[in-house]
Image (cartoon, rainbow, N blue to C red):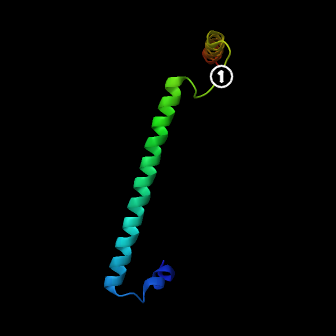
Amino acid sequence: MARTASEFAHLSDAELKALADQIHDELNQARTAYQAAVEKGRKIACELGRRGQLAPPLHEDPAAARKELNDRLADAKKRRQQGP
């Protein structure tokens, strides 16, 4: 860490404080922009979901997929109850 600290060793205390404030402001601006982009993305995803445009269904027949899942869970439960 001392190696990177030497990069700023020539700066006065006031210059170093000003640089720290500048970096802090830049980080706040980046954070604010990121939060705004995330919020905009959420709103877009919400609207796409409202319109039914998000993702195609994973299965043609949701009831058949549910039955297959329940069957697999029941089989796993039976195997656990039988033991090794």
Image position, residue 81 (x, y; %): 60, 15
Q: Residue at x 47, y 81 (%)?
A: 2
The amino acid beneath tag 1 is Leu
Find residue 76 and report its image quarter: top right
Against 1, residue 53 (above or below) is above
Find residue 59 and report its image quarter: top right
Q: Residue at x 65, y 11 (%)?
A: 71
Q: Nearer the viewer, residue 12 or 83?
A: 12
Q: Nearer the viewer, residue 22 or 8?
A: 22
Image position, residue 68 (x, y; %): 66, 13
- Label 1 belongs to which residue? 58
Q: Residue at x 62, y 9 (%)?
A: 63
Against 16, residue 64 (above or below) is above
As helix, strand or loop, the secondary structure at mark 1 comes to loop
Image position, residue 57 (x, y; %): 63, 21
Q: Residue at x 57, y 28 (%)?
A: 54
